[in-house]
Amino acid sequence: MPSNRMKKTLRILTALFPLLVAPHALAHALYVFAQYDGQTVTGKSYYSDMTPAAETYVEVLRHGENQPLMAGKTDNRGYFHFPLVVEPKVALKVVVEGEEGHRATVVADRITATSNAPTQASDESLLLLREDIAQLRDKIYLHDILGGIGYIVGIAGIAAWLSARKLRKGR
């Protein structure tokens, strides 16, 4: 028959198991960013390990509606470009469906071209800038990992303190 101490250790390990497995559950999250310049919806889709979501299904919808305006696939580098003209001030939602049931949704950012720069060159540079920002935002950093470990150690410390307090009262 297992002792109380063994049961307690088993409970703690069982409680900590989801915390240890959780980072792997998000290991293949799907991300997307998109922009709309009034004539073309462009963007990129990628997984959390920064690999492009190649040949994934993409839909463009009016925000709040379920009927797609345009559908297609990303290219081998995860980019998509769809010519689409809709009335001004309409919010467009981009939905990407990847492998293994992954799905990402974003409202396309509306951009306007400046009169002193060529439209295609400025759109491409803006897309590259948005890609860099999105990848920096979605990347997991060392301080995030250390913060998670700190939470775990802190919770274990509180549990040990409460356990010791209970033992002292029992004497």
Image (cartoon, rainbow, N blue to C red):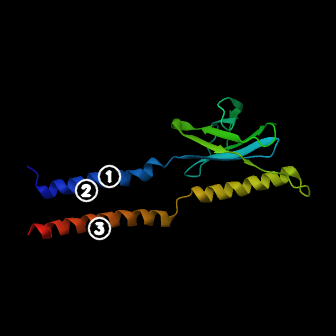
Amino acid type indicated by mark 3? Gly
Foreground residue among 94 and 118: 94
Q: Residue at x 38, y 51 (%)?
A: 21
Q: Sequence order check: which comes first, mark 2 or mark 3?
A: 2
Q: Disc 1 designates what residue?
A: 17
Foreground residue among 55 and 157: 157
Q: Position of residue 3 (x, y in %)?
A: 10, 55
Q: Which mark is residue 12?
A: 2
Query: Is residue 164 in view?
Result: yes
Question: CA gap, disc 2 to disc 3?
Answer: 12 Å
Q: Is residue 127 left or right of residue 150?
A: right
Secondary-structure class at tag 1: helix
Q: Position of residue 10 (x, y in %)?
A: 21, 53
Amino acid type indicated by mark 2? Ile
Q: Quadrant of residue 158?
A: bottom left
Query: Is residue 75 in view?
Result: no
Q: Is residue 148 left or right of residue 30?
A: left
Label 3 neighbour load within 10 Å: few <14, some 14-19, many 20+: few
Q: Disc 3 designates what residue?
A: 157
Foreground residue among 131 and 110: 110
Q: Residue at x 8, y 69 (%)?
A: 171
Amino acid type indicated by mark 1? Phe
Q: Quadrant of residue 131?
A: bottom right
Q: Position of residue 89 (x, y in %)?
A: 78, 43
Secondary-structure class at tag 2: helix
Q: Residue at x 86, y 51 (%)?
A: 119
Label 2 neighbour load within 10 Å: few <14, some 14-19, many 20+: few
Q: Residue furthest top?
A: 67
Q: Residue at x 91, y 55 (%)?
A: 115
Is residue 171 depicted above or below 95 in this figure? below
